[in-house]
Amino acid sequence: MRKISLILLSVLLLAAPVSASGREDVVYSWNCSDKRIALTFDDGPHPTQTPEILDILREYGIRATFFVIGQNAEWYGDCLAMVYAEGHEIGNHSFSHANLTEAGYDGVCREIDEAERLIGERIEYRPHLLRPPGGQLGEELCRAASERDYTLVCWSVDTLDWAHTPPDVIAQNVLSNTEGGDIILFHDYVSGESPTPAALRIIIPGLLAEGYEFVTVSELIGAEE
Ligand SMILES: [Zn+2]
């Protein structure tokens, strides 16, 4: 009996998310022995930047995960519908990109629920993944997420595209730091000119040549989409 429990425990441990902060309820990357990785795009949808990224992903036949802001889903519903129709996974990134560590429990719930409602209204899909704005985690957020059966997802590789890092620097960083199981953070909305499309045009062929396979976050972690 004891032996069985030990085996079970090791299986559970092997399947556990890798947690950079020590929190076991947040996914940063996934322990896997193969070369599967997940590209993620935050802060959209945006009427010009999102379609540009969709074009590149379509060209390479790659599915990614888009963490959508509820307010943008309301403003640019057609764009959200396009992302979803092309087979990408949609995650919740709050209604207004507020700092959820300062919103209080009720405020956190409103931010999650309102984004979920607006996404659902447009594409009739209920996200299962929640990415906190800025990756900032608090007890109230973790509680609200768990009550709603959301998996909290951060990232293990930050491209720093949001800081207008030059495309070749982003590409160099991603190509030299990525390993199987990584969750890579990009943005499909960056204020001003976005370096993301040009970086993707270097990164995707580079990682494909190294044998990486691109999957959605739910596929990576073995969850239902
Ligand atoms: Zn964000």
Image (cartoon, grey):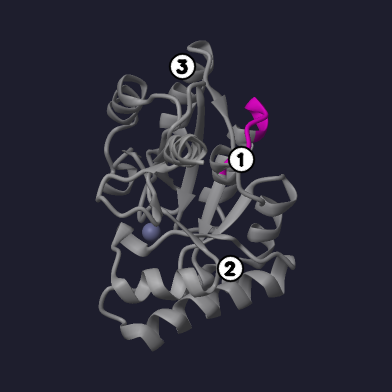
Three-letter amino acid code of the residue under disc 1: Glu
Q: Nearer the viewer, mark 2 or mark 1?
A: 1
71, 155: nearer the viewer: 155
The magenta span reads 58-64
Three-letter amino acid code of the residue under disc 2: Ala
The residue that disc 3 covers is 206
Percent across and percent down for residue 189 are 44, 54
* Quadrant in the picture for residue 194: top left
Q: Would you say residue 188 is visible in this rendering?
A: no
The residue that disc 1 covers is 219
Percent across and percent down for residue 123 are 72, 65
Percent across and percent down for residue 223 are 61, 48
Relative vertical location of residue 166 with respect to residue 225 in this rendering, above or below: above
40, 200: nearer the viewer: 40
Residue at 37% across / 26% down in the picture? 178
Three-letter amino acid code of the residue under disc 3: Gly
**Label 3 beta carbon less than 8 Å to ligand 1:** no
The residue that disc 2 covers is 73
Label 3 packing within 10 angstroms: few (<14), some (14-19), many (20+): some
- N-term-proximal mark, 3 vs 1: 3
Q: CA distance from mark 3 to mark 1?
A: 22 Å
